Image: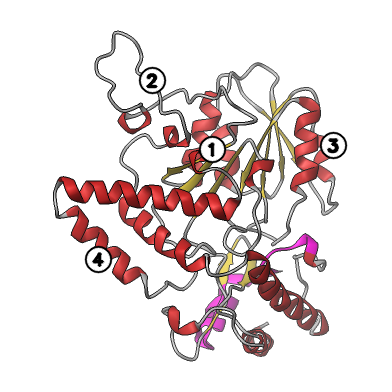
Amino acid sequence: MNSLFDPADFRLPPGIAHVCAGGETAALRRHDEAVLRYLADKSSGLPGRTEQEREIEDARAGMARLWGVNQGDIGFVSNVAEGVSIVAESIDWRDGDSIAIDANEYPSVVGPIVMRRDPVIQVRQARGTERDRLASCVDGSTRVIAASYVSYLTGERVDLAALRALADRVGALLIVDFTQASGYLPIEASVADFAFSACYKWMLGITGVAVAYWNRVRQPDWSPASAGWHSFAPGSRGYDTIPALKADAMRFTRGNPAHCPLYVLNSALSYLSRYDMRDVQRHVQTLTVALIEALAASQVPVMTPNDPARHGASVCVASPRAAAIVDALHECGVYAWNGQGRVRFSFHGYNTMADVDRVVEALSGCW
């Protein structure tokens, strides 16, 4: 099985099976030019700032195409936790309100809400592996259902349409983190009220910027509870009345956006636009299915659901020796990812079936 992407386009060390996209993907070589272009624009005075603003709008347009939404629905924050925090502080919370989450949900999706103290928000946690397990956590007290489309811990993919129906049944917001999905799965962000994604994994960007999506059809009157100079509409001066906010999702962006990471993101989105996400999904899931089957044959327990409709691009293996195993794999030329008591193997378009074989061979020697 050949790679979908040209491996020569990436900084892939020779002889390495780079299977840790769920942590960090290999960098595109074209990003060198993007960073240098940013540095040149930064050094050229006001015309350079004009170029930076154009780069932001190009990145917004690229994200809108990738997620199937309008450009005005896309803004930027520094990370997912910041975006969720902005939404959380805008909600008029009441005593007894609750949030429904999976017990293994990513901390950035949950922390900004559960750390609130006035009032304290009840946390309803779904446990187990049943696909509809969140339903038992949702009732009239539920103000937010928060979920990652694909789990960072197990690689499980959730049914967002079912979560949308649950949220609509009780009038709750649906907040979705697309970090472990965007860049290889087709995304229809409009299923969510608000959605976020880091950019340094399958979207092939770098840290420092994250995507913030505001569903202006579902939540037309939404307004953040705080702002910075960049959140306000241009031309605002003085504070006798509160300045008007920007009309679109750039009200998420309180200060200067992270211009250099946005140049890189725009470069990455341009590269990804060459590919149909259905083809990328098909490619990576051919590899995940092959790895799951091979690990099952080797009697290595896998946390990730077998059904491709229920998993993404990662295969996760639980082990109390996860850190030592990942170190040993690295010595064998297999770059995997450690954390939370599991080893995670994640594929992208530059991987091939030979990488699956390398993983199985190397893992058999250290399992």
Q: Which amino acid does label 3 sit on?
A: Ser
Nearer to us of marks 1 and 2 is 2
Nearer to us of marks 2 and 3 is 2
- For label 4, the SS is helix
Residue named by callout 4: 36
- Is residue 314 in sight in this rendering? no
Residue named by callout 1: 84
Q: Residues within 10 Å of mark 2 (few under 14, many from 20)?
A: few
Tell me how far mark 4 sits from mark 3, CA to CA: 52 Å
Residue 81 point in image, percent of width and height: 50, 42
- Quarter of the picture containing the C terminus is bottom right
Residue named by callout 3: 136
Q: Quadrant of residue 41?
A: bottom left
The region drawn magenta spans: 309-336
Tell me how far mark 4 sits from mark 1, CA to CA: 32 Å
Nearer to us of marks 3 and 1 is 1
Q: How crowded is mark 4: few (under 14 residues within 10 Å), some or many (20 or more)?
A: few
Tell me how far mark 3 sits from mark 1, CA to CA: 23 Å
Q: Which residue lies furthest to the top in this view?
A: 240
For this view, does 264 lie left or right of residue 299? left
Residue 24 point in image, percent of width and height: 49, 67
Q: Earlier in the sequence, mark 3 or mark 1?
A: 1
Residue 158 point in image, percent of width and height: 75, 52
**The magenta stretch spans residue 314:** yes
Asked whether the beta carbons under mark 4 and mark 3 sit within 8 Å of each other, the answer is no
Tell me how far mark 1 sits from mark 2, CA to CA: 22 Å
- For label 1, the SS is helix
Q: Which amino acid does label 1 sit on?
A: Val
Q: Which of marks 4 and 3 is nearer the N terminus?
A: 4
Q: Earlier in the sequence, mark 1 or mark 2?
A: 1
The residue located at (66%, 16%) in the rendering is 95
